[in-house]
Amino acid sequence: MYVSEKAKSIKASTTLAIDSKFKAMKAEGLDVVGFGAGEPDFDTPDYIKKAAIEAINAGKTKYTPAAGTMEVRKAVAEKFSRENGLSYEPTQIVVSNGAKHSLVNAFMAILNPGDEVIIPAPFWVSYPEMVKLADGVPVIVDSTEEADFKVTVAALEKALTPKTRALVLNSPSNPTGMVYTAEELKAIADFAVKNDIYVISDEIYEHLIYEGKHVSIASFGEDIKNRTIIINGVSKTYAMTGWRIGFAAAAPEIAKIMANVQSHASSNPNSIAQAATVAALSGGMDEIEVMKKAFVERRNYMVDRINSIDGVSCKKPNGAFYVLMNISKIKGKTIAGKVINTSDDFAELFLQEAKVAVVPCSGFGDDNFVRWSYAVSMDTIREGLDRLEKFLAM
Ligand code: PMP
Ligand code: GLU
């Protein structure tokens, strides 16, 4: 069948694939436990739901401007001022159908065919595919577990070519949970300014940092702010994954192009979810603190358990809600009669034999790891790790 070569080259999202497999197995009545897609197990706070119901009753059920209502763009601009010390006009804010959509808009706005985008690995599975969708070329820069999965400016310099247009930064990181320090960010900001490249700064996990505080790379002065497209949203912070609201802040020219692209691709994001987002962003941090406390407890338990099990290990992440488990010592071993050669082999067999869903990091740029999400209950975490112990002894 005749299809687009570009679209054909795009791989399916492993995170979403594992999640739907897990949900399908569960629906079949199988005793499966899931650590796949990263979504908070908490419910969306009541005050946000109430705002959505009020929006429906008030008839806020029509098209809005493509980039979002002035009200939501103002609420986002106020968020950046209050939480990040960054001043943006509402016209520099584009509200989209999730941060994923904001990222696609950003790459569409800045890339011409063949432009290169540096992506530090391990990376969130969607970045390289999004770059390819926008006719760009992903350039992967590896990091090591020993260096806390952080890339240095020296490594970035090596990847630089005359075609480099942008760098993707994701701190706190999915999947590593790593958080760059202010000094490290400043060095990367200087690198971007010196080489006149954009930074796509995905800050969706900014409120899920367990020691210290988030710093946006855009906050190191006007030069870097003009070159940074900040991506954020309500999915993780407010347990609103299904509402599909993300947002971007960028230089006026870039924001305008992103809004134009969106006006043809999807029009405005859901009007009711926009109203709910205004409430979320104006509602204080109490509920987030409750979630954070639970995440810290779960992270500590998961990290200690993994590191007490022979053959696997992990670093203690400082942000987001993922643990990367090193399986390099398991590779080449036989479990339940099958040889494990790759992280895909591991994840597949773990799901089949132990009924535990984790994400193989083949799609995240480092095949020595699988990813566990700890945005699930403590009981689930205990059960998953009990099963891991039994599985490794099979
Ligand atoms: N960026 C990162 C790093 C993510 O993990 C995710 C996953 N949800 C997104 C962006 C997209 O978030 P959203 O649900 O708002 O599309
Ligand atoms: N971002 C989350 C994850 O990595 C949700 C799934 C997705 O959007 O890919 O699991």
Image (tube, rainbow, N blue to C red):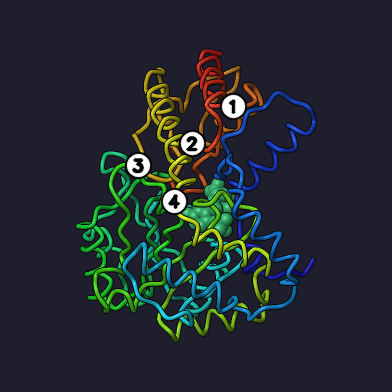
Instruction: Give me the C-alpha separation between circle 4 and circle 3.
Output: 15 Å
Asked if disc 4 and disc 3 are in contact, CB closer than 8 Å, the reply is no
For label 4, the SS is loop
Asked if disc 1 and disc 3 are in contact, CB closer than 8 Å, the reply is no
Instruction: Give me the C-alpha separation between circle 2 and circle 4.
Output: 32 Å
> Label for residue 285?
4
Q: Amino acid type of disc 3? A: Tyr
Q: Residues within 10 Å of mark 4 (few under 14, many from 20)?
A: few
Q: Is residue 294 above or below residue 252?
A: above
> Label for residue 350?
1
**What residue is pinned by disc 2?**
370
Q: Image point 55% across, 43% down: which residue?
A: 40
Q: Amino acid type of disc 2? A: Val
Q: Amino acid type of disc 1? A: Phe
Q: x, y percentage for residue 320?
A: 43, 45
Relative horizontal placement of residue 56, taking residue 230 as reference (left or right): right
Q: Quadrant of the C terminus?
A: top right
Q: Is residue 125 visible?
A: no
Q: Earlier in the sequence, mark 1 or mark 4?
A: 4
Q: x, y percentage for residue 331?
A: 46, 28
Instruction: Give me the C-alpha separation between circle 3 and circle 2.
Output: 22 Å
Viewer-proximal residue, 120 or 378?
Answer: 378
Q: Quadrant of the N terminus?
A: bottom right
Asked if disc 2 and disc 1 are in contact, CB closer than 8 Å, the reply is yes
Q: x, y percentage for residue 95?
A: 56, 71
Q: Earlier in the sequence, mark 1 or mark 3?
A: 3
Label count reads: 4
> Label for residue 210?
3
